[in-house]
Amino acid sequence: MCEFFSFHLSAESNRARAGKLLTPHGEIQTPVFMPVGTAASVKAVDADDLKTLGSQIILGNTYHLYLRPGAAVIREAGGLARFTGWMGPTLTDSGGFQVFSLRDLRRVAEEGVHFRSNIDGSPHLFTPESTIDIERDLGADIIMPLDVCVEYPTTHLEADRGERLTCRWAERARSHWENDKQKQALFGIIQGSVYPDLRSRAAESIMALDFPGHAIGGLSVGEPKAEMWPILDQLDTLLPPQKPRYLMGVGTPADIIRAIGYGIDMFDCVMPTRNARNGTVFTVDGRMIIKSARYTRDFRPLTEDCNCLCCQNYSRSYLRHLLNVGEIAGLRLLTIHNLHFYLTTVAAAREAIIADRFAEFSRGFLERYDEGEFDVA
Amino acid sequence: MCEFFSFHLSAESNRARAGKLLTPHGEIQTPVFMPVGTAASVKAVDADDLKTLGSQIILGNTYHLYLRPGAAVIREAGGLARFTGWMGPTLTDSGGFQVFSLRDLRRVAEEGVHFRSNIDGSPHLFTPESTIDIERDLGADIIMPLDVCVEYPTTHLEADRGERLTCRWAERARSHWENDKQKQALFGIIQGSVYPDLRSRAAESIMALDFPGHAIGGLSVGEPKAEMWPILDQLDTLLPPQKPRYLMGVGTPADIIRAIGYGIDMFDCVMPTRNARNGTVFTVDGRMIIKSARYTRDFRPLTEDCNCLCCQNYSRSYLRHLLNVGEIAGLRLLTIHNLHFYLTTVAAAREAIIADRFAEFSRGFLERYDEGEFDVA
């Protein structure tokens, strides 16, 4: 269907999958973690850092880019990959998630969602068609249609309404995309909150539209973890194996490893970058709060075996100091470490899948990794 | 006098000098610009960036480091070079400049200067001896004695008193340094505001103490530029040529080129780093205000011939966007460019001195460089 986009499964281990995505800006080995570059910048690092880290694909947020610098500027720059200097594959969301999180500043209608800018209060309307147009300007390799993001908890009635509207919007988005198809793959988003009947209906409707890939939305929005796994379990049996599966906005390192075990191929999350900026460091044992006084005279690296720029050059004592006095360099160094941890963890999962020992890898990882207070992502 | 520290003049061109400083942590080609790493971090960049930029020596501020993380932590880390991961030569000031800028929070006495921390209001006393002790813990290659930093404008009487106290403190600092000399070179600081008689007397007193190097303090503190050059002119004739000369806290790129013409060897200034963080970019033509709307669709690099990481990878349009939306990456990228500009400009001056064409270089630079509103540094 898309000559410029394809997905090939290369290995499976239990239900975990290793594959390869081909996009106009390059090849992506899956499972893959996608760093989030909200406003055309993965916060605190630059494109050169992202390349050094071995990132494969970067996200951009349509809502933010639409407001600043504006989609036309990015189109004139030659698209997000060129504008940011990243040059590799990119993915844009539809802006829906950000607009829905505006709460008092937005109103949902059949045509789309009306909202006011969080920057200057100006009124705007996102429709399934207009977001495709904006994403066309942004020029990412993978684009997402406008969807209705319901909160958690929500009633079955609300979730039902949201899911039906999401599907009607998906159909409109797909037609609009098809009418002037650029080298961009549009994924379908499956909503339905924590209700299995709605998830099942959503999967059927979205599959019927034959998108190049499937995304699972509306999870990791505050529900207990115990509610997420049955949905992934259910969708794994419904979704066609030959198309890539993207679990939106998830999650902790342990969440990602578990979700890979349910056949998910793609992940994005602000957790490694956002946590870095408040001094939270991810390691195989769980999280370290680097600002703690216990690290004042600890001259070891964050983690002994890590080969990231941060661990190769700086001590816990120095990083603690940088965070405590508010030095910008500290934000970048911890971001580099956390992204490195996420990227190498997912790369290790991929290797385990290829060697058909994912169950063992997953068990080992989850036994050692202490989730701590991160039960709700 | 110091077997671990030496200065060799290798070339002169008119009054400009090219030389070599040997320190325990490495060799420094002069004239040299020294990036300022106030709190053990050159703001927005890391040690790896500083190496890539070809920095030769980094400053630390004793006042800040004494308060956080504390001198003992840095001593235990093995000194500032190891603590920061920079590993190369470092210089610390005495903390005097910061303490004097506290104004209402400090009181000068014969013994030293009493002050309250700007962080928690706790009371402290810096004496000529205690600052040497702190700097010994910090472990820089070049250290500065406590001096009295008078404001501009000041009366002759105030400047006279400040200069005399600076000289008495210099003598005490020198004795204390001599009694337990580590591999650190203590420089003498010449004060005296804009008064030639005081500068002359200060130079005589400081020279009599036979320090390994000389620093010129109390300039670039708000006086018109026209008042600075006669002082440098005068001191060039008084100071012994075989010792390095450090002009503290100066200045704009044009100031530095002019001061090199008066025989200055060493410079430090927060201008390239601080200005980067508010979006001001230095170029051979003067300053660019990158946040300006004129750069919205300007996809050229900051400067065409620059080989810094920033100019090699990013456009004015992208950098403008990063600064306008407050992305951290933008602060680092502009800092890298500005430091690169300062470092390469001083390196070019050195080459011109060695080729004995400094006058021509200086004239060419100053004719092209537009100082704009930066008359007072």
Image (cartoon, coloured by chain):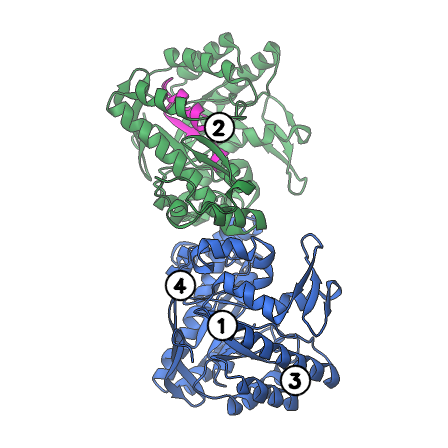
Chain colours: A blue, B green
The quadrant in which the N terminus of chain B is found is: top left
Q: Which residue is mark 1?
A: A285
Q: Residue at x 45, y 48 (%)?
A: B76
Disc assigned to residue A88: 4
Callouts 4 and 3 on one subunit: yes
Kind of residue at badge 4: Gly
Q: Indicate the position of residue A331 as horizontal and vertical percent values.
A: 52, 54
Q: CA distance from mark 1 to mark 3?
A: 30 Å
In front here: A294 or A168?
A168
Disc assigned to residue A194: 3
Relative vertical location of residue B293 with respect to residue B368 in this rendering, above or below: below
Kind of residue at badge 1: Asp
Secondary element type, mark 3: loop
Q: Indicate the position of residue B339 as horizontal and vertical percent values.
A: 42, 38
Q: Which residue is mark 2?
A: B249
Which stretch is magenta?
Answer: B244-272
Q: CA distance from mark 2 to mark 3?
A: 62 Å
